[in-house]
Image: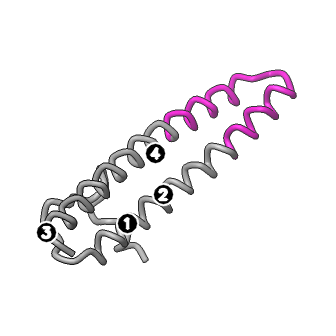
Amino acid sequence: MTKAERRRQRTRLEEERQTLTSELARTRTRIAQAYSGFNSARDPDLVESFIYEINSLQARYTYLLRQIKKLEEQREEAPERSGRWLPLPGMGRPLSAYR
C-alpha cells in the first residue's frame, strides 16, 4: 500500500469515526427524550409507544458502538499507524482495549 493510499484510508476511517460518534451522541439524546416522554405519559398506548421507541433506540445505540469498535480494530490492523488517532471522546482508552 502506498503512502497516499494509507493517508486516504486513515482519512476515510477518521471521517467514518466522526460520523459514528455524532450519530451515537444524537441517539443518546433521543433515548433521554424518549425516557422523558415515557415518564410523563399517562395513556397506556402512548406508554407502549415510548417503550418500543426506547427499545429501538437502544438497539441502534448498541449497533453504533459495535461499528465504532470495528473501526478501532481496523485502525489497529492498519500498517504504519500515525499517532494522530485519538480515543473516543470521554474515554480514556480505545474500545478495543475493553475486550
Q: Earlier in the sequence, mark 1 or mark 4?
A: 4
Q: Residue at x 30, y 78 (%)?
A: 77
How many numbered discs sit on the rendered protein? Answer: 4
- Measure the C-alpha gap from mark 3 to mark 4: 31 Å
Residue corresponding to mark 2: 65
Mark 1 residue type: Leu
Q: Secondary structure at mark 4?
A: helix
State which quadrant residue 49 falls in: top right
Mark 2 nearby-residue class (10 Å; few <14, some 14–19, many ≥20): some
Q: Earlier in the sequence, mark 2 or mark 3?
A: 3
Residue corresponding to mark 3: 3
Nearer the viewer's eye, disc 3 or disc 4? 3
Q: Secondary structure at mark 1?
A: helix
Q: Earlier in the sequence, mark 4 or mark 2?
A: 4
Q: Is residue 34 magenta?
A: yes
Q: Earlier in the sequence, mark 1 or mark 3?
A: 3
Mark 3 nearby-residue class (10 Å; few <14, some 14–19, many ≥20): few
Q: Quadrant of the N terminus?
A: bottom left
Mark 4 residue type: Leu
Q: Secondary structure at mark 2?
A: helix
Residue corresponding to mark 1: 95
- Magenta residues span 28-55
Residue 24's disc is: 4
Q: Residue at x 70, y 37 (%)?
A: 53
Mark 2 residue type: Leu
